[in-house]
Each structure stands twice: as C-alpha cells, then as structure tokens.
C-alpha cells in the first residue's frame, strides 16, 4: 500500500504535496518523496522515514521549487525497503526528464523486468514501478503521452500512476479502479490528484470526482485537464480499503469509509449476536465497526483500551521474555471498566492472529469474565496481489485453521467473522468489489 499525490498549477506545489502526504501517512510509513517542477527543472527529495521527519530541513521547500509536484508515501508491497526503492523515481530519457509515483502492484512485473534485462536494461531498484520508466524510455513514439500509453499497455495489475515531466502531469488508473484515486480542485484553478480525499480536506481543495477506471487525465498549461479513456472501465474497487486501509474521513467511489465500517459493525451484530455487558473496539481500526455493533445490539460502547500513538514501526523488537511488551507498548486496558464484565471486542480484520491473542490475554488479565471476539470482515484466506501487503498463505491464520481452532488459539470465549455476503451488503451490492483476500478470485488475467 502506498499514497500518491500530484499537484498542478498551484503556488508552492511541493508544500501542498507535503500536507497531502501528511494526511495520507497511514498508507505508508517506510519512506516518502516529492519531486517538483518549475517548468525548467525537476527537483527531488526522498528518504526513509515519516513525512514530518523527512521534510523537516529549513530549506526543503525552497529547494523543491515550482507549481507542479508529485509525491509518494511508501509501504512496500513489491521491492525491498531500501532507499533505492523510495519514490518518486526520476529519470532522464530521450525527450527530457520525468518523475513517476505509483500506488498498486503490477502482477506481470517479473516477466516485464526480465524482458527488459534481456534487452540490456539496467535496473536501480527492485520496484515494479521502475518497469514503467524503462518502457517509456524505450518507446519509439514521438510524444511522452504516446510513450506512456504504449508503456501502460504492457503492464497488468493494480495501478494509480502519476507521471510528471517538466511541464505536464499525467494521472493514470487501471481499468478495474482497484486502488482509490481522486481528483480535486483549488479555488484559484489549480488541481490535485490523490489516493484519498482526506488529503483534499487538509489542503483546502474541493473534491471533483474519482479518476475513472481505465482513464488517463492530462494536466497541461494551466488548462482544464483533458481526459482520455484508455480502457473500457470494469470497476472492482478494493473492499479492504473500506475495511482497514483508508482513513475513515475519506470518500471512495462516493462512499464514506466511516459509514461503511459502522454498517459492517451493524451487520456483524445481526449475524453474530452475543450476550455481553460492554463493546470495546481495538483502537483505532475497530472503532467505527464497534460503534455500529453497539448501536445495533444496544450493548454499551466503551473506549476502554487506550492506544499510545507514538509507537512507530521502527520500535526495537522486544526480547523473547518480554513478548507481551510489544502489544502493551501500544495498547493498555482500563481495568476499572473491564473488571468482571462480559466483553465483546471488535476489530476490523484478523490476519496472523498474533495481536488478537495478546489482546484477549490482556482483557482477561484486566478481569474480563468473558471475551467474545468479533471481526468486521470475513476470514482472510488468500494473499492480495493487488497492492495490499498481506502475508503468504503460511502466515494467514484463516488459511490454515478452522474458526473453532482460531478461537482456541487466541483464547477467546467465542469468535465470529462478518460473512462475505454481509460485507458486500454493507458496502452496497450495486458495485462489484475486489474481494481476493476473501474469495481468492484473482480476476486480472
Ligand atoms: P493479527 O491480530 O496479527 O491478525 O493482526 C490484525 C490487525 O492487523 C488488525 O488490527 C488489522 O487492523 C491490522 N491489519 C490488517 N491488515 C493489515 C495490513 N495489510 N497491514 C498492517 N496491518 C493490518
């Protein structure tokens, strides 16, 4: 998973891109980068780390000049976490210079990469995104636009690309529209394209519409953006964006993420009711679903697990004897509320089952008389290869154990998942979703 942003025809574009990346930090915390253009040159800054750290030098935005910028937050789904795998990727080729950012995952990357290597290409990184640069550079077409079209035609998978030359910006989305990608506008006429609409709210842009599946939008000379439909749209937005990944204040394909999560919680309460005294969310991922469950069941919602927001991914792994420390650093129960209660604990999803086991233990130690685990999504039985970082089959608990075995493993008194039908009903049946993690239907051939 990653976040991308493109800003066009806006004063201090790099600063706007920075705020947008800050709003989308949840989509990737490994590395971040911005390339700006002043029409003559492309300037780039990228580094491992969080948005607030990477751009903290005083002269950062003075150096990232111009009224256009593309930016990226990285969460590795393909490639390694080395700095070479940070984006934007910037390259000089026959017609000039380009900066490319990508959110998604190209499923034919190995074939394309091998073909390019056989033809003599030299790769700088392990990222699938680099394929696009090579394909553009090697194309014999006369314009960058035609080269991009030819390059895109050779890749398959989930992609939202932003490609910036010195003067133009291109936004391209795959025909299934798997990852979110939205267009916003500033009052003074400038544009912004971002993975999530929460970025628009922070920078004061107005949502215009989603970039259509299969569409290429071209930003040029401060004119109205031009739209070219490259492929017949066949929409399959990713259900996991609604379940876990996107921020609750974002709107994807006209649907607010928070409302969808609450609806999943309500359905879960209908499908899997339980006699209990209080509902607790796993913060923050389970909050909206827990509120929905509480509303539907009439059982009181208590925010009785406190989350420490300062635990980063880089925190040193605790030694074996202090295994519980990892979850305790992040989550702490309010004993007074939990003691002697029958508790329903709600999370958005179960992946490896490691956090959930520790949460159940923590609640029992805090004095809960019963712990009922409820998951606001179906069992994750298959890895996603369309841009979400799910582990392989061996690590996915639901791919290897029955529900009863999982219940026993995590130590809960009962365990239930939202059904696949309940998920689709919550999201709205009018749309076909990408549900690969749940049904294993890898629909891109
Ligand atoms: P576990 O208890 O180990 O199965 O982990 C489940 C937790 O991981 C839930 O709280 C989810 O919100 C969270 N989660 C789900 N998918 C992902 C993902 N792709 N990357 C990081 N965390 C995730």
Image (spheres, helix red, strand yellow):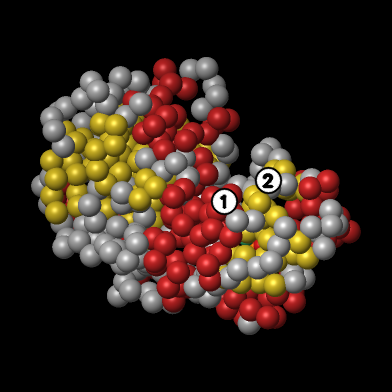
Q: Does 145 appear above or below 112?
A: above
Residue 25 in the image: state x and y as whole percent. Answer: 51, 40
| Residue at disc 2, secondary structure | loop
Extreme left residue here? 142
- Residue 65 rendering spot, x and y as whole percentages: 35, 22
Residue 48 is at least partly visible in this image: yes
Residue at mark 1 to residue at mark 2: CA–CA distance:
10 Å
Q: Nearer the viewer, residue 430 or 41?
A: 430
Place of residue 175 in the rendered image (x, y in percent of width and height, measured from the top left): 24, 61
- Name the residue: 44% across, 77% down: 440
On the picture, is 286 further left or further right than 331? left
Q: Would you name the residue on which mark 1 appears?
A: 291
Percent of width and height locating residue 233:
20, 61
Q: Callout 1: helix, strand or loop?
A: helix
Q: Is mark 2 within 8 Å of ligand 1?
A: no
Quadrant in which ligand 1 is drawn: bottom right
Eyeballing the image, is 200 above or below 340?
Answer: above
In the figure, is residue 380 to the left or right of 37?
Answer: right
Q: Nearer the viewer, residue 44 or 265?
A: 265
**Residue 139 visible from this viewpoint:** no
- At horizontal 36% and vertical 55% (from top left) the residue drawn is 179
* For marks 1 and 2 on the same chain, the one whose residue lies earlier in the sequence: 1
Q: Nearer the viewer, residue 416 or 393?
A: 416
Label 1: how many Cα within 10 Å (few below 14, some 14–19, many 20+): many
**Residue matched to label 2:** 303
Q: Which residue corresponds to the image point at 16% horizontal and 63% vertical from the top-left? A: 232
Q: Is residue 150 above or below residue 307?
A: below
Label 1 near ligand 1 (CB < 8 Å): no
Compare residues 49 and 312 and report the one nearer the observer: 312
Quarter of the image for the C terminus: give it: bottom left
């Amino acid at each position: 998973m990653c976040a991308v942003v493109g800003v066009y025809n806006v004063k201090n574009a790099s600063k706007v891109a920075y705020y947008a990346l800050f709003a989308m930090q949840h989509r990737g915390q490994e590395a971040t980068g911005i390339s700006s253009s002043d029409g003559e040159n492309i300037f780039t800054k990228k580094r491992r780390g969080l948005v607030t750290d990477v751009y903290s030098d005083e002269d950062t935005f003075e150096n990232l000049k111009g009224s256009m910028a593309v930016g990226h937050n990285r969460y590795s789904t393909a490639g390694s976490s080395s700095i070479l795998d940070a984006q934007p990727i910037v390259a000089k080729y026959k017609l000039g210079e380009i900066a490319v950012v990508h959110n998604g995952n190209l499923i034919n990357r190995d074939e394309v990469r091998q073909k390019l290597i056989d033809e003599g290409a030299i790769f700088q990184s392990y990222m699938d995104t680099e394929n696009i640069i090579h394909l553009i550079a090697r194309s014999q077409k006369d314009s960058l636009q035609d080269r991009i079209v030819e390059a895109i035609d050779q890749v398959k998978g989930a992609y939202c690309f932003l490609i910036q030359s010195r003067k133009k910006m291109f936004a391209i989305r795959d025909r299934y529209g798997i990852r979110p990608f939205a267009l916003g506008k500033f009052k003074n006429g400038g544009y912004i394209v971002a993975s999530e609409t929460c970025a628009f709210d922070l920078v004061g842009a107005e949502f215009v519409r989603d970039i259509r599946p299969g569409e290429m939008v071209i930003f040029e000379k401060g004119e109205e953006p031009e739209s070219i439909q490259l492929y017949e749209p066949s929409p399959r937005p990713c259900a996991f964006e609604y379940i876990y990944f996107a921020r609750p204040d974002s709107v994807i394909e006209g649907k607010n993420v928070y409302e969808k999560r609450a609806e999943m919680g309500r359905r879960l309460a209908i499908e899997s009711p339980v006699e209990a005294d209080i509902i607790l969310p796993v913060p923050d991922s389970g909050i909206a679903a827990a509120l929905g469950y509480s509303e539907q069941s009439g059982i009181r919602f208590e925010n009785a697990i406190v989350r420490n927001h300062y635990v980063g991914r880089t925190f040193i792994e605790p030694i074996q004897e202090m295994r519980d420390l990892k979850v305790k650093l992040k989550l702490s129960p309010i004993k007074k509320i939990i003691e002697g209660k029958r508790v329903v604990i709600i999370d958005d999803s179960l992946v490896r089952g490691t956090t959930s086991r520790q949460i159940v233990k923590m609640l029992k130690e805090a004095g809960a008389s019963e712990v009922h685990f409820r998951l606001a999504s179906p069992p994750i039985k298959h890895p996603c290869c369309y841009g979400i970082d799910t582990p392989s089959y061996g690590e996915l608990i639901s791919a290897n154990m029955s529900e009863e075995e999982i219940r026993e493993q995590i130590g809960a008194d009962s365990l239930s998942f939202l059904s696949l039908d309940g998920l689709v009903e919550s999201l709205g049946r009018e749309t076909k979703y990408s549900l690969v993690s749940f049904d294993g239907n890898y629909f891109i051939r």
